[in-house]
Amino acid sequence: MASNDAFDDRYDLREFAPTTDDQGAPTPETEAWMHAVGLGFHEPHPDAEGAARMASHFLEDQETFLGVYVREPLPGSVDETWPAGTFTWFRKRLTWDEGAAIDTQAISAVTVRPTERRRGILRRMMTHALEGGVAEGYAVASLTASEGTIYRRFGFGCAIRERAVTVRRERALPLLAPTTGTVTVVTPEWLAEGTGRAVFDRFDARTPGSMVRNAGTWPIVLGQRNGDGSPAKDVRAAVHRPEGAGSDPAEIDGYVTWRVKEGTGDTVLEVVDLVYATDAAYLSLWEFLLSIDLNDVVKYNRSRLDDPIVAALGDNRAYDVEHEEDHVWLRVLDVPAVLTSRPYAVDGSVTLAVADAMGFAAGTYRLDVVDGQGTVTRLSDGDDGEADLRLDVADLGAVLIGSVSPVTLAAAGLVRAADPAAPALLRAMLTPTRTPHGITYF
């Protein structure tokens, strides 16, 4: 795009809230936006019932839609009604550690029609959204990405990674240490009555990097619907109760949903959702999954990088990593607000010079931590003084949760340290009490 004028001559940027009619069906503007998102992600458009259900989720999550529309569409083109670019944001809480959390501006459904690429659509939508986020009081934005190379240029850094793993049953059991508590098979319908969400709330409150889930996620993870919205008929469920627990569902501290897929090769048990409020629940549910007959491999796509099941297995070579990729990305909008919202593991002081091409977070800041609580002093609007560490805003977002080490980023040349001890000090300050684990996509 040569200039903003060129964008405005060709496109109209519209911000609007999704709406439905008296029957609960999405209004034409909302459904056209949904069509454009489906085109971008190669997803079929749902039937009338599914479209109404999706629209109700948009309303429940209180989403804000953006659409970029071609001003002079060619006859017959979907551009006559569908936006050429889509974008949405909504409020989503992120847990720093037990007792500490922050609301993020969660970004999703980002698409640009291939016919309109390289015309500044994504930059205009992102700039508009982040400016709106600042106006709404957000200190940080978040997203999960379908591609790993898009968002760094907008100041986002990958703060959590995850792994897709498999465990071969015949080599896994017995575990090296006995598990505790009781696992019981339940129906997905029973789990969906409230127990599943209650367990997730406990997981979410104690787990760094966890984020609350979209309304539309729950029917899928609890085994009621498939990703395309059709009824799920092959999902099973089980729950874990700790030692000494009674029949009260409130005592349940973990659940798993799964399906089994047969093919010409291995029969694979695929974990749909695995949520745990205690380590004992996590290990017991894994032991249960590995005990299910008539399958060869348990597959889990949400494994954290230091998964304790590796150490627990009778033969740790039964565990294989199929794939590792980025998960949660964070974009700092207000450095003092972000750094004072989270707890710290050790006391200390460090001065950070933050570069931000979009201008939201640029400046030099001193972080002082006393008794685990941080205070931040803004020293300047730019990098015009001494600093212990110099880094891009994307790399500040990457280290925030404590899953990515400043020492590693310094070794990669992304964090520049005046004192070699400074990255290690920041790493120690940011270390969470538990390993970050994000199991929410949006």
Image (cartoon, rainbow, N blue to C red):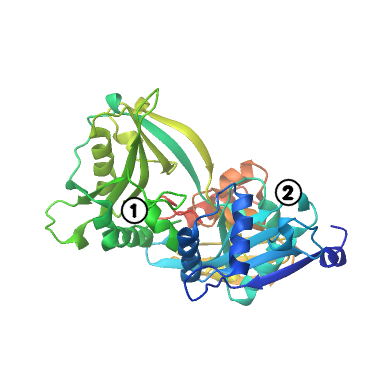
Which of these two is toward me, 421 or 247? 247
Q: Quadrant of the N terminus?
A: bottom right
| Residue located beneath label 1 in the image | 222
Is residue 213 among the parts visible in the rendering?
A: no
Check residue 114 in the rendering and tell me which mark sits there, or answer none: 2
Q: Residue at x 68, y 61 (%)?
A: 82
SS for tag 2? helix
Q: Residues within 10 Å of mark 2 (few under 14, many from 20)?
A: few
Residue sitting at x 19%, y 60%:
249
Q: Position of residue 58 (x, y in %)?
A: 51, 66
Question: In this rendering, does residue 57 appear at all?
Answer: yes
Q: Splitting the image into 4 quarters, where does residue 350 fall?
A: bottom right
Circle 1 SS class? loop
Residue 107 location, quadrant: bottom right
Q: Earlier in the sequence, mark 2 or mark 1?
A: 2
Amino acid type, callout 2: Pro
Task: Check disc 1: other Cα within 10 Å, few if <14, some if 14-19, many if 20+.
Answer: many
